[in-house]
Structures are given as C-alpha cells and as structure tokens.
C-alpha cells in the first residue's frame, strides 16, 4: 500500500518551492548598490545585505519560491534574494524573425502606441 | 476648409498653434528670399553657445537648434518658446536655451526632453488620470475603420476563446482606472513576432507571437495595462502635431501652384512651376517635418512609453495582479526581444561595412563614401526615430518608480496561471495559432520562391480538418505557391476562396491584380483596387497599398490620382504613399 502521508508531504513541499533551477540572475535591478538577502524562502529572516559590487554575476538559480524569493549561492553561501530586486532574463524566446511578413515589416508600427519595432 | 477646423480639443489646437509657430517664421524668411531669389540666406554671425548638456536626443536638438539658427533668420519670431511648451505638456516653458527663435526653441527643447525622459517620478502616475467618463481621442477614426486599418497592416485573427478571456482581463484593468466607458477591445493579429499596440479608438492589438510568449495572466495584464495606459493618457493626440505640419506643407504647395496658375492665366510670367523662393519655403517645411518625424515625435513617444509603463504598473497593482510575476517578467521578455533585434542589427551593420570595404578595395572611393554616409545616416535615423526605449532601460526606470512611488512595497499576489493556459489551449485557439505559424513560414518560402515547399506546408492547413481552411491568407498563399509552380487552373480556386473569405487580407487583392495583369486586363485591375479600397473602409493604410498595387501593375495614371488624394487626405501616410510610388 502506498504511503499517502509521504506523498502528500512531498506534494506540499513541491508547492512551497515553486520551481527548480530556472535560468540565471544576471544583475541587480536598476541602479541598486545593495541587495536584501534572506536565509529562508519566504523572506522572513533577513541577513546582512549584499553589496552588488561584491557579487559575481551571473548567479545560477536553484529554486524560486511561491512568495517571490530566489535561491542562489553567493560566495559559496546559500541566500534567498527578492525577485523584485534582481534581473532574470528569459533564456530564450519562442518567437523568431523567421516567420515575419518581410514585405510589410516596415509598416507594422506606424502610428501604433506601444508597438515593438519588429523584425526590420 | 481650414486646417484647424479638423480638430476640436485643446491639445490639437495647441499642436496646430505650435506647427504654425514653427512654420510661419520660416515662410516669412523665405518670403524675403522670394522677393530677391539671389540673396543668400541671412546668417547668424554670433556663434550660438552649446545649450545642450550631454548627448542623446537632447544633445541632438541642441545641435539642431544651433544649426537652424545659423541657416535661418530668427528675426521677428518672439515667443516661440512659450508656445512650444504649450504644445508639449510636460516640457516646461523654460527653455534654458540659447536665444530665441526656432534654434533656441530646439536647444531648449533638447534640454527639457533630456530631463523629462530620463527623470523618474515619486508620485503615482495614476494621479494624472481624471476620473469620470472617458473623452474620445481626436485621433479616433471609428471602430470599423480602425480594425480595417490593422487588418491591412497586420491581419486580424479570429480566436474568440482567447480574445473573450483577454477582454475580461482588460475590463478588470479598466475598472481599476476609475475612468468610465473606456472604449476598445483586444484583437489578435496574425503576426508571429512580439508585437502589440493600442490605437486612438482604444483597441488593443496583440500578435499571435506574443500570446505564445506570455506565461500567465499577470503578464498578459502587464501588456494590456501598458497599452490601455496609452489610451487613457491620450497619447495618440500628439499625432496631430506631425500631421498638421504635413498638412500645412501640402496646402502651401498646392496653394503656390494654384497661385502660379492664376498668375499665368492673367498674363503673369511665373507659370505653374515653383519659384526658387517658393521651393525654399517648402524645403524649410520639409526640414521641420523631417525633424519631427525622426526625432521630436519619437522622443515624445519614448516619454509616453515611460508614462505607460508607470500607469500600467499602477493599474495592475490596483486590479490585483502580481508586479513580480507580471510586470517584471513581461519587461524582461521585451528586453530579450530587443537584444535579439540588436544582434540582428549588428549583423546587418557588419554586412554594410564589408560591402563598403569591398568598394574601397576596388578603388571606388566616391561610391564608398556615399554608401558609408548612407549607412551612418540610416543608423542615426533608426536610433533617433525609435519610439521605444530598450527593455533594459524601461526596467531600470520602472524600478526607480517602484522605489520612489511605492517605497518598494506592493501586495504579495500569486500569479494566475491556469485560466491563462486554459484560454490559450482552447480548441478554437491553439490549433489556429499553430496553423498560422505554418502559414507564416509558407509566406517566407514563397518570398524565397520555394513554391513546392510552401505548397507542402499549406496543404494540411487547407485540409478538411483545419479550422483556418476558409481563411484568406492561407488560400492566397496557396494561390501564389501553385502559380509559382505553373499550375494556374488549380491556383484560381484558392484565389477565389481567398477573396470570398470574411477575414480578408490586402495581399489577396494584390494577387488578384497580378492574376489580371497576366491576362492583360487593366480594367479588371482597377476594379480590384477599388474593391480592396472599399473592403478596407478606405482606412489610411489602404492608400499606400493601393498606390503600390497600381504601380506594380503599370497603372501610372491611377497611381498618381491616389497619390494626390493621399497627400491631401492622409498626410501622416504621405511618406509611405510617396515610397510606394518609387
């Protein structure tokens, strides 16, 4: 008979830690000189802030919590950073310029507020 | 009818006033030239101090200001700076410039643009919205024409399973704005790249490529909130500025020709050719139009983008969406897309450099210099006229806003993922988007004359199980593929289906015109053009398309007639119409 208690616990843990190893932290957001750092996935236990100039980017992401904190290693130490203070670019995009209507690409943004520049 | 009577709002009146303020002094100075065509333009003998602080768009305007001051007389142009500030709300009356006149105006404007664009703000952008009933934009063209305009330039996709869902998100954001009766709906366009935009009618167009790229409802809300913000902040009204300039230039041109014709008919000697002085007036006008097109208007555009990002964030947060899982990843995606574009641009630039090197090696110095200048000019133009800051800069600016206006505190909200995934995977959405991806690939294969490959790709898309078998674009492309393979009889069936489809595309009419050209039937080509124009409600972009259709098929007289109408009625499409005649 399967151990339902174990399975339930496993599911709960999976829910608490939203996702595993998604991309890299490439920089601090904006012009921040320091980043807040935490020892837990919910940002309840704050530790000494990190000086941005002392961090060697990119940082590999090990986990992302549902509450918006990102698990990385800085100088060998495990820390959780606030998602709002760091840059995490997508590794790749699904869209490409291969399927753009090249005949009218230069017409795409005319007069349209917010339109991207397209594959020109 | 006077130019100003087209508009009623204070913004449009201010724009007209500014355009007149910019143009009339030049007309005056050229008037002197007209009286004495041989006289050299008066030179400013005093070297203007560099008013700009630093480079960028502000530096450009400072240099331009000085340049204009040295090539035009600025006598008798008092008060330009005050008027200028009226026309561009947000840029203060103080110019900080060096002297008056047009040159001073641009110098001062350069400084203010630098300050305004790069500055942040510590109060919510939301406070700029006036609650109450939404007042329509002067630039609105009417819902059907607006949709047809985008049908021409982008192609509209029917995916109700997704648009209904996206419209429910849009409604939440509209409610959060406290502005009532905001018009517009979400419409999906057939475009596989990341492309979205809002029109003056309030409609928000998002590409099928964008739908594939977004990851949750919060990211969709971020995109829609940004576009809705353009509508709420009436950003489209600034289009009037450039258009009025072009209208004045066009009317001046027409007026001068009429006057000359009258002079001739009453025995004057001028004839209907423009005099050197008249030409100079028009050249000055064109210079200002060019400045507006490549620098001033796009600079406003960048400021508007920053405003839309800030208000978009406010609306998202108010509507209960996640900043960290919505706004930030959406802008990260935009930044990635920008980086890809920059990479493509670098490759193009390398190719240009290589071809210049080849010319140099071949001893063709003059050609090489010309080409190099051409590339440089295009690059500068491209950078100046980009109406968007890159995603990186936008993220930085938004972070500054998050710090100053929000004190880094927003409600913790979990992202909404399941409803988004469900909407995207609905049976009337997912297969349609997947099939259109194949259609886009087929279009490029046809452009590359790989007709057999294109036909193979299109065959299942037009099969009995496909939801887009009756759509205009795949049928038109199948016509082109079969025509390319020399199977004309088979091809006709698909052309007919394409033209009968409810969701028309302009290219179907282009194909029909080519079909009749093959038969030498010029009358039928004219009818095709007329039908296309009517089908797309005479929307602005129908003009350059129709000109191109007539041009391609050798109907010069018809092309010129449409060109004249475009110059008078669709001044903001004037450049596209002109390009279509080349």
Image: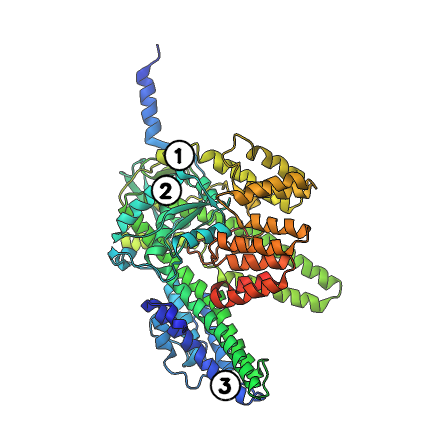
Secondary structure under tag 3 reads helix
Q: Label 2 vs label 1: CA separation?
A: 12 Å
Question: Relative to B444, is A88 on the left or the right?
Answer: left
Q: Locate the C terminus of chain B by quadrant.
A: bottom right
Chain letter of disc 2?
A: B
Q: Dot 1, crowdedness within 10 Å: few (<14), some or many (≥20)? A: some
Q: Label 2 vs label 3: CA separation?
A: 56 Å
First along the sequence among labels 2 and 3: 3
Can you give x and y, in whole percent of width and height, for residue B52 in the image? 44, 72
Residue at mark 1 shares a chain with residue at mark 3: yes
Residue at mark 2 shares a chain with residue at mark 3: yes
First along the sequence among labels 1 and 3: 3
- Residue under label 3: B31
Looking at this view, is B486 or B56 the one in front? B486
Looking at this view, is A19 or B244 the one in front? B244
Question: Closer to us: mark 1 or mark 3?
Answer: 3
Looking at this view, is B102 or B4 the one in front? B4
- Residue under label 2: B166
Q: Which residue appears at 56% of the width and 32% of the height?
A: B463
Can you give x and y, in whole percent of width and height, for residue B1 in the image? 41, 73
First along the sequence among labels 2 and 1: 2
Q: Is residue A96 above or below residue B557?
A: above
Is residue B295 visible to the viewer in this orientation of the structure? yes
Q: Is residue B515 above or below residue B103?
A: above
- Residue under label 1: B421
Is residue B409 visible to the viewer in this orientation of the structure? no
Q: Is residue B90 above or below residue B107?
A: above
Residue at the top extreme?
Answer: A1
Secondary structure under tag 1 reads helix
Q: Which residue appears at 33% of the width and 67% of the height?
A: B8
């Amino acid at each position: 008979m399967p151990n339902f208690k174990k399975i339930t616990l496993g599911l709960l843990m999976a829910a608490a830690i939203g996702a595993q190893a998604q991309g890299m932290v490439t920089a601090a957001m904006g012009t921040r000189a320091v980043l807040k750092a935490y020892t837990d996935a919910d940002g309840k236990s704050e530790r000494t802030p990190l000086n941005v100039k002392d961090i060697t980017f990119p940082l590999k992401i090990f986990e992302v919590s549902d509450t918006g904190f990102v698990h990385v290693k800085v100088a060998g130490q495990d820390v959780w950073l606030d998602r709002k203070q760091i840059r995490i670019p997508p590794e790749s995009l699904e869209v490409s310029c291969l399927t753009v209507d090249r005949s009218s690409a230069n017409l795409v943004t005319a007069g349209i507020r917010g339109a991207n520049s397209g594959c020109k | 009818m006077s130019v100003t009577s087209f508009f009623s709002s204070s913004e449009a009146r201010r724009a007209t006033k500014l355009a007149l303020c910019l143009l009339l002094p030049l007309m005056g100075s050229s008037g002197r030239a007209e009286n004495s065509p041989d006289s050299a333009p008066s030179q400013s003998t005093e070297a203007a101090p560099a008013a700009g602080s630093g480079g960028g768009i502000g530096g450009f305007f400072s240099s331009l200001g000085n340049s204009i001051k040295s090539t035009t007389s600025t006598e008798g142009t008092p008060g330009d700076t005050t008027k200028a500030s009226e026309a561009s709300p947000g840029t203060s009356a103080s110019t900080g410039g060096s002297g008056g006149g047009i040159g001073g105006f641009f110098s001062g404007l350069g400084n203010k643009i630098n300050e305004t664009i790069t500055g942040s703000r510590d109060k919510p952008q939301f406070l700029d919205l006036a609650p109450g009933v939404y007042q329509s934009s002067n630039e609105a063209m009417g819902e059907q024409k607006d949709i047809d305009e985008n049908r021409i330039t982008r192609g509209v996709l029917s995916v109700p399973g997704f648009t209904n869902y996206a419209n429910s998100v849009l409604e939440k954001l509209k409610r959060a704005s406290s502005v009532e009766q905001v018009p517009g709906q979400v419409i999906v366009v057939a475009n596989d790249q990341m492309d979205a935009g809002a029109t003056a009618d309030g409609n928000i167009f998002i590409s099928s490529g964008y739908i594939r790229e977004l990851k949750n409802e919060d990211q969709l809300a971020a995109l829609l909130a940004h576009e809705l913000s353009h509508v709420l902040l009436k950003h489209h009204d600034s289009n009037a500025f450039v258009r009025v300039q072009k209208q004045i230039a066009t009317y001046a041109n027409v007026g001068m020709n009429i006057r000359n014709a009258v002079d001739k008919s009453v025995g004057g000697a001028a004839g209907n050719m423009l005099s050197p002085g008249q030409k100079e007036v028009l050249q000055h006008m064109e210079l200002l139009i060019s400045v507006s097109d490549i620098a001033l208007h796009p600079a406003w555009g960048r400021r508007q983008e920053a405003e839309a990002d800030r208000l978009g964030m406010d609306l998202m947060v108010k509507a209960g969406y996640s900043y960290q899982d919505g706004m930030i990843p959406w802008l990260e995606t935009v930044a990635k897309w920008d980086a890809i574009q920059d990479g493509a641009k670098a490759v193009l630039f390398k190719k240009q450099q290589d071809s210049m090197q080849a010319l140099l090696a071949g001893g063709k110095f003059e050609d090489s210099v010309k080409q190099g200048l051409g590339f440089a000019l295009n690059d500068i133009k491209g950078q100046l006229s980009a109406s968007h800051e890159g995603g990186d800069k936008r993220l930085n600016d938004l972070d500054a806003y998050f710090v100053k206006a929000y004190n880094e505190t927003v409600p913790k909200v979990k992202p909404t993922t399941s409803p988004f995934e469900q909407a995207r995977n609905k049976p009337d959405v997912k297969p349609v988007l997947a099939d259109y991806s194949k259609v886009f690939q087929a279009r490029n294969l046809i452009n590359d004359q790989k007709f057999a490959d294109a036909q193979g790709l299109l065959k299942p898309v037009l099969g009995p199980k496909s939801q887009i078998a009756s759509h205009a674009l795949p049928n038109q492309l199948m016509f082109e593929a079969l025509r390319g393979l020399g199977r004309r009889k088979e091809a006709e069936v698909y052309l007919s289906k394409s033209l009968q489809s409810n969701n028309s595309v302009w290219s179907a009419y282009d194909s029909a015109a080519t079909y009749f050209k093959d038969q030498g039937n010029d009358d039928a080509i004219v009818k095709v053009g007329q039908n296309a124009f009517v089908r797309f409600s005479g929307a602005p972009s129908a003009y350059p398309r129709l000109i191109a259709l007539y041009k391609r098929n050798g109907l010069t007289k018809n092309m010129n007639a449409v060109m004249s109408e475009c110059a008078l009625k669709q001044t903001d499409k004037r450049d596209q119409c002109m390009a279509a005649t080349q």
